[in-house]
Image (cartoon, helix red, strand yellow):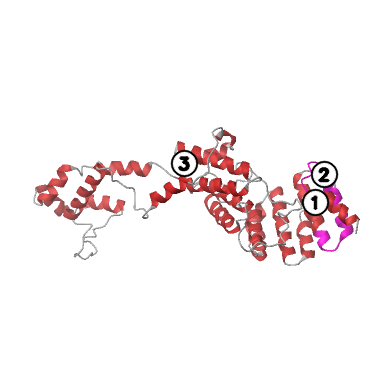
Amino acid sequence: MSEGSSPNRRFDDSRGDRGPRRRPSGDSRSGGGRPRHGDSPRRDQEDRREGGRGYGRDTQRSSERGGNRNERRDDRRGGYGEDRGDRRSGRRDDRPGRPQRHGDGDRGGRDGQRRHAQRGGAERSGGARSGPQRSGFREERLNKRMAEPDLPGDIDIHDLDPMVLQDLRVLSKDNAEAVAKHMIMAAVLMDDDPQLALRHARAAKDRAGRVAVARETCGIAAYRAGEWKEALSELRAARRMSGGPGLLAVMADAERGLGRPEKALELGSSPEAKSLNREAAIELAIVLAGARQDLEQFDSAVVVLQRQNPDLQASGFPTLRLSYAYANALELAGRKDEARQWFSHAGEIDEDEITDAKDRLAALDTE
């Protein structure tokens, strides 16, 4: 668990009041459409077309002779065609001993022709590149993939939400399948083995860093593993990519985990918080009440939950979550008679015994 975790956190504690449990393939998606950027083969196609514009062996021989008519004609024209190609590829004339001036170097026909002849030879030898890459990038990516956790052979990627599979279509087929399988394993293991689930989620993110749902999955897995900083980083990235409110409750609770309840309250007052649906608004209110309790503002915590209109006649999972959190807030505020009433209601509607509401009620009755 990352440093700075708070012992007073109520949102995901041993009493059964756990955080949002959503599969990354379903309702946990941050609500924005397909990602706007992704791994695309277009750049490679452009490079191949650029390599076939006539800058071949004949051009290289003419540049080496240095005196043919084509070269003199290019000098008179200023090498416009070559300069346009160079600006697109981002190359510059870095020969030592010659200063770069505005209008010089890249726009010289002879220099541009020589550079294109050299580039044509590199492309024929298989050295074409779409752009500069950091030193050791390929080795680092290979090492990451070798360190990925193993995937069972019986995973069906169609278990994922169809909208998630649609988002992954920006990737190559093989890569998209691998990402989908890692995301499924992250969802399956999140409860029983959160650390292994996080490894799968990181593998999916490393393969599909520009896909919002992959970053969101990694953020949720990091949150469940107690890696608060990583959770915030990934969920913020997912929000930037897809728009919408994102998983505000998870982000706010991660801020509490880092010992920053004030930051959690700031997220609760953001404009995005007003656009949440009923269930998401309840989850966020539970976290904000916990942040108030972290600050020992127990009466304010009760008020935060009262704004969600808890109802003794309602049922369902969101109502169970709200009733339990409201009973807990009332107890901490010293209003034990009211807390008994709400723990009793939570125990009645908790058919699967998700919470420990009945035990909490029994403890209050013995006091």
Q: In which quarter of the image is residue 188?
A: top right
Q: Residue 311's spot in the image, x, y percent?
A: 82, 50
In the displayed structure image, the side of residue 316 where residue 216 appears, left or right: left
Q: Which amino acid does label 1 sit on?
A: Ser
Asked whether 108 or 175 is in front, the reply is 175
Residue drawn at 50 percent across, 45 percent down: 148
Nearest to N terminus: mark 2 or mark 1: 1
Contact (CB < 8 A) between labels 2 and 3? Answer: no
Nearest to N terminus: mark 3 or mark 1: 3
Q: Which amino acid does label 3 sit on?
A: Val
Gap in Å between the C-alphas at discs 2 and 1? Answer: 10 Å
Q: Residue 223's spot in the image, x, y percent?
A: 62, 53
Contact (CB < 8 A) between labels 2 and 1? Answer: yes
Q: Identify the residue under disc 1.
A: 323
Please, what secondary structure does the residue beneath circle 1 have?
A: helix
Nearest to N terminus: mark 2 or mark 3: 3
